[in-house]
Image (tube, grey):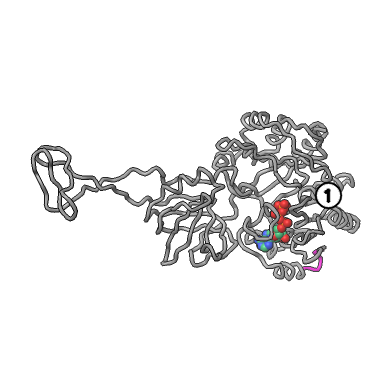
Amino acid sequence: MQKKWHLGIDDTDSQSGMCTTYLATQIVEFLILNDVKLLDFPKLIRLNPNIPYKTRGNGAISITFSAPENKINLLWNEFVRLTEELSDIQDKNTDPGLVLIKGDIPNSILNLYQRALFQVIPLDEVKRLLAEYESIRTHTVKSGRGLIGATSAIAANLINDYTYELIAYRDPKNNSHRLIDEPSVIEADQKNPLSFNNYDYEHKQVMIIPHGPDPVICGIRGETTSAIIKVWEEIKVAQTVKNVMIFRSNQHTQVHFPKEFSIEEIEPYTSVKVRGKVISEPKDFPGGHVIFSIESLNKRIAVAAYEPTKRFRKIIRELKESDEVLVMGGVRPESSEHPMTINLEEIQILQLSPQYKKITPKCPSCASSLTSSGKNQGFKCRKCSYSTSKKEYINTPIGRKIRCGIRYVIPICAQRHLTKPVSRDPALQFHIAEAIDFEQAFDSFLKRRPFITKA
Ligand code: ATP
């Protein structure tokens, strides 16, 4: 009898090579070759982006399939073998973890995902949780820290919002340049509005190409599988493509800010959403960083728009004392050089404080401009000799360049994988229809795959 299985994988790669999504693609290939039915696209789940030991984007994988119980040992042995073969275990920061869950996912595990999106979860806690269920299989190398991501990826619920990513791979042994034609990316991006973040027009940067030594040639993200396949078909790639896979993902859904924190509750390495009043106005610091502070309930915290956020810093410089803001970002711990600081991903203005500039009044008798009579003295009129004993300026309201009700989000080139680009809001409705039928979408991808692989 067929059973449902959930496989989770994480922490297999390092700065010097490999990629957990590549390993997942090899596992999917193996499952297809062995006539194992996939029940969903493999899932690429991004977790708290501020985890200090992440390699790049804190991504973990889960794969859901159906297989008879008597076949599972064979499959599991191959998952373990592929993981050991395709992990960079020599690296001191690579600690792979594999998890296999049969049937429905227990509630205690489902809850882990929500927390892993913004908190730091201790490995011991996850090990204890998994040990409660005899039927759950795990495989670990070294500390097995990957169990945290692997379990969270299985628990990830992509019901309300999700996106897709098509990832194309080169041979992991061949680290030559990635050869993608920039104008073709711009053209494909403009023709396919349901694919997003392909190009940063503001900073003129192709966004689909990573820069590390991993096997990814490019990753194309979007609302529907058909949109990302079209972009892939339309871009010009001048190198051999070993494989292509589509992942369903929580990328760009902003799920890492599920609730508001008070300043007092903020902890290092977490993702937080906090409201407060600007207490010290933005200042420019060496390196191009712009930093201000907010206060609420008598606690204050520094907030930074770092140099990589480019033009976003212009918005931040417009903040004034007493403006009420909602900030979202990752928490950098205190160091000898700076206090604990929120690294901004998004800001919303809740209320603009009235700002005035002081204007020298006109002469009430002849309407000429008054001038100062000197320090600690009043004004005088040069034309009609009118004078005042005190300087009483007129306060005139100043217009503000920033507005309430807008999501000010950092530019594409600085965005985290989970950041929701402003362009996604109206697009959300489109992926729902396609999701109803995974089998049809996956079949159509598999059928087109020989043609969309540009060998
Ligand atoms: P890539 O994006 O290239 O796949 P990565 O950035 O995902 O790499 P990993 O090498 O997988 O980095 O390392 C991330 C580590 O952090 C994993 O061991 C994972 O289990 C762990 N981890 C993920 N989320 C959390 C969390 N919320 N709390 C604690 N540990 C976490």
Q: Is residue 368 left or right of residue 49?
A: left
Quarter of the image for the N terminus: give it: bottom right
Ligand 1, image quadrant it occupies: bottom right
| Magenta stretch encompasses residue 367 | no
Q: Residue at x 73, y 71 (%)?
A: 128
- Tell me which amino acid carries mark 1: Ile
Q: Secondary structure at mark 1?
A: helix
Report whether residue 24 is seen.
yes
Percent x, y of residue 213: 76, 47
Task: State yes or no: Cβ of the residue under disc 1 lies below 8 Å from any atom of ligand 1.
Answer: no
- Tell me if residue 196 comes above or below residue 264 in the rendering: above
Q: Is residue 75 left or right of residue 424?
A: right
Percent x, y of residue 416: 61, 49
Percent x, y of residue 381: 12, 42
Q: Residue at x 77, y 66 (%)?
A: 143
- Tell me if residue 309 comes above or below residue 237 in the rendering: below
Q: Which residue corresponds to mark 1? A: 27
Tell me where the magenta segment starts and ends, as one range: 133-138
Quarter of the image for the C terminus: give it: top right
Percent x, y of residue 220: 69, 39
- Between residues 217 and 117, which one lies in front from this camera angle? 217
Main SS, magenta residues: loop
Report whether residue 59 is seen.
no
- Between residues 227 and 418, which one lies in front from this camera angle? 418
Residue 267 picture quarter: bottom right
- Tell me if residue 59 comes above or below residue 426 in the rendering: below
**Label tally:** 1
Q: Is residue 47 left or right of residue 363?
A: right
For label 1, the crowd category at 10 Å Cα-Cα, with few meaning under 14, some 14 to 19 and many 20 or more, is: some
